[in-house]
Amino acid sequence: MNMKKRHFTPEYKAKVAMVGLKEVNTFAEFVSA
């Protein structure tokens, strides 16, 4: 399936974290609105 499992570089993790935080913030605003 995903043979590049060990290709999770800090940059990739940071990118995923940024996207995740953005989605969480949007969801929080939607709920609190």
Image (spheres, rainbow, N blue to C red):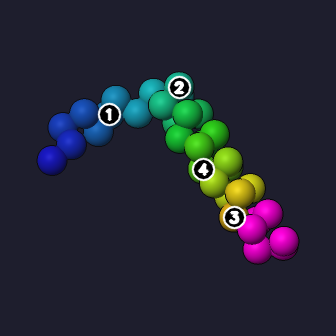
**Horizontal arrangement in the rendering, residue 28 relative to residue 7 (left or right):** right
Residue 20 located within the stretch drawn in magenta: no
Counting residues from the start of the chain, the first of labels 3 and 1 encountered is: 1
Residue for badge 2 = 11
Question: In 3D space, how far apart are the residues under numbered discs 4 and 1 (Cα atoms)?
Answer: 20 Å
Residue for badge 1 = 6
Boundaries of the magenta span: 28-33
Residue for badge 4 = 20
Q: Amino acid at mark 4?
A: Gly
**Horizontal arrangement in the rendering, residue 2 relative to residue 10 (left or right):** left
Asked which secondary structure carries label 3, the reply is helix
Seen from the viewer's position, the closer of residues 19 and 3 is 19
Q: Main secondary structure of the magenta part?
A: helix
Residue for badge 3 = 27
Residue 29 located within the stretch drawn in magenta: yes
- At 34% from the left and 29% from the top, the residue drawn is 7
Mark 1 or 2: the one toward you = 2
Q: Amino acid at mark 1?
A: Arg
Q: Amino acid at mark 3?
A: Phe
